[in-house]
């Protein structure tokens, strides 16, 4: 496991390369570790968001501006705060930090996403937690030579499905021509300039609300059974949460209207244009293709790709309820698992070292990306607070009460369902301050969503 966790990023001739030191010592540690011991002080304010206590806010989604200065409490003094910081010689791609206060601990991992994904972070944290409990032997290991995409079974899939990617993809990221690439980049940069300063929000979605929305969506599916026997059979909680992020936090960005109409169900309900929207959802290949990633081995590197439904006109998204959007996402996932995922593996086998740039949307269309970390189950990881108690046959363990997610560099129109607690799911979304004001002004009046700013 150490060999993959301890990678360094090194600038190459045309791209970043990944190097693993031949040996580790005090000058070349496998990972950077730091701590802050302030036993006389409480956990810094703002680390855990304060949710309004009125009944409406407790039973409906709440959107809060994230105080990004809080992230520093989860990082050591030498931890990079920008991606470029990882390109300096000898900087480990994994940075771990512990803050010890009189009323709680803060545990932070800072990772490079091209090396690690959320599941890999969960593997690392569970191994760390098992060590505190004296149970490291129970951790599934990652062999030093483990390359899932190079097995004979996957090579056979690549040979069978490789031609699929010779044509334009109908899901997820796309291969495009140079002119299309140039047009997309120009338009994207211009959209960032036009959007202005960015803001990160925290979104709390109560479990009671999510359960009600899921029941509504599955009831709608039940009515469709006789009409669409080939459609999805159920809608999951993740489908509801991801659809909510897309519908509430996105699509207002490209609206050119200065005056919003009377508030309706979602913030982009005034969109009447037909611009196509690409809704991309990240997916863990470990679960999508278990034959390549058996549970008997832990894969520590990034194994994430994306899928999405066919591009949808903004006016369609403006008029459909949340349940319909969730059903749309579930149907896209089912189709992806039934076929294109094999072509995805073939594509990775053929193009992984080619430096190929994929785009989330062709010129003239727009996109947003959402991901869920719920399957990593960060909130259920148990740490032993006193290792001596394990030796004495006792076991006093603690679980996280809140798991946030921060970006080293903040991409616009990217959302994450980060974690859950006993009563709610927590997510984060990056958008512009101007878009955020529009969202608030439209949604605040109807009480569907509560705001703390």
Image: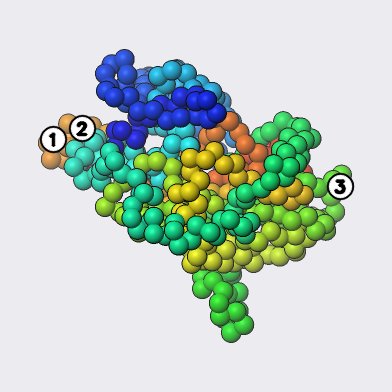
Quadrant containing the N terminus is: top left
Q: Residue furthest bottom?
A: 226
Left of 287 or right of it: where is 398?
A: left
Foreground: 391 or 129? 129
Which residue is drawn at the image coordinates 39% and 28% (left, top)?
19
The mark found on residue 387 in the picture is: 2
Which residue is drawn at the image coordinates 55% and 60% (left, top)?
164
Q: Toward which corner of the image does residue 230 lie, by quadrant? A: bottom right
**Cα separation between marks 1 and 2:** 7 Å
* Position in image of residue 62 (x %, y %): 61, 47
* Position in image of residue 388 (x %, y %): 17, 31
Q: Residue furthest left?
A: 392
Determine contact: label 3, label 1, CB under 8 Å. Answer: no
* Position in image of residue 177 (x %, y %): 68, 46
Which residue is drawn at the image coordinates 21% and 45% (left, top)?
138
* N-term mark: 3 or 1: 3
The mark found on residue 171 in the picture is: none
Secondary structure at badge 3 equals: loop
Q: Which residue matches tag 3? A: 257
Determine contact: label 1, label 2, CB under 8 Å. Answer: yes
Which residue is drawn at the image coordinates 70% and 49% (left, top)?
362
Question: Is residue 67 visible to the viewer in this orientation of the structure?
Answer: yes
* N-term mark: 2 or 3: 3
* Position in image of residue 298 (x %, y %): 31, 46
**Cα separation between marks 3 and 1:** 66 Å
Question: Is residue 211 visible to the viewer in this orientation of the structure?
Answer: no
- Label 2 crowd bin: few (<14), some (14–19), many (20+), radius 10 Å: some
Q: Which residue matches tag 1? A: 391
Position of residue 27 relative to residue 331, above or below, is above
**Cα separation between marks 2 and 3:** 60 Å
Foreground: 305 or 96? 305
């Amino acid at each position: 496991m150490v060999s993959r966790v301890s990678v360094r990023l090194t600038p190459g001739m045309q791209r970043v390369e990944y190097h693993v030191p031949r040996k580790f010592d005090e000058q070349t540690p496998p990972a950077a570790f730091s701590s802050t011991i302030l036993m006389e002080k409480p956990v810094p304010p703002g680390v855990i968001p304060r949710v309004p206590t009125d009944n409406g806010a407790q039973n409906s989604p709440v959107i809060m501006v994230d105080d990004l200065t809080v992230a520093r409490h989860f990082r050591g003094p030498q931890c990079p705060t920008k991606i470029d910081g990882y390109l300096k010689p000898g900087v480990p791609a994994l940075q771990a930090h512990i803050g010890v206060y009189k009323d709680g601990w803060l545990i932070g991992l800072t990772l490079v996403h091209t090396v690690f994904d959320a599941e890999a972070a969960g593997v690392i944290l569970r191994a760390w937690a098992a060590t505190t409990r004296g149970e490291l032997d129970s951790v599934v290991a990652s062999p030093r030579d483990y390359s899932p995409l190079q097995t004979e079974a996957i090579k056979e899939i690549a040979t069978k499905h490789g031609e699929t990617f010779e044509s334009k993809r109908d899901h997820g990221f796309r291969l495009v021509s140079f002119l299309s690439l140039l047009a997309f980049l120009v338009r994207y940069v211009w959209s960032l300039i036009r959007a202005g300063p960015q803001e990160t929000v925290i979104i709390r979605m109560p479990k009671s609300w999510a359960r009600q929305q899921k029941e509504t969506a599955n009831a709608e599916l039940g009515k469709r059974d006789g009409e669409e026997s080939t459609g999805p059979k159920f809608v999951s909680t993740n489908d509801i949460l991801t659809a909510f992020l897309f519908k509430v936090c996105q699509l207002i960005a490209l609206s050119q209207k200065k005056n919003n109409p009377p508030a309706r169900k979602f913030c982009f309900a005034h969109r009447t244009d037909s611009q196509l929207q690409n809704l991309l959802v990240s997916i863990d290949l470990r679960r999508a293709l278990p034959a390549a990633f058996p549970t008997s081995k832990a894969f520590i590197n990034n194994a994430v790709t994306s899928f999405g439904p066919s591009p949808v006109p903004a006016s369609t998204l403006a008029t459909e309820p949340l349940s319909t959007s969730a059903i749309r996402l579930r149907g896209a996932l089912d189709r992806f698992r039934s076929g294109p995922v094999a072509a995805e593996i073939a594509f990775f086998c053929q193009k992984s070292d080619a430096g190929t740039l994929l785009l989330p949307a062709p010129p003239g269309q727009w996109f947003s990306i959402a991901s869920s970390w719920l399957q990593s189950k960060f909130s259920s990881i148990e740490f032993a607070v006193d290792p001596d108690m394990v030796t004495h046959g006792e076991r006093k363990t603690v679980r996280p009460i809140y798991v946030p997610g921060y970006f080293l560099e903040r991409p616009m129109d990217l959302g994450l369902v980060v974690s859950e607690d006993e009563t709610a799911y927590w997510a984060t979304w990056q958008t512009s301050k101007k878009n955020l004001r529009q969202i608030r002004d439209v949604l605040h009046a109807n009480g569907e969503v509560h705001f703390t700013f």
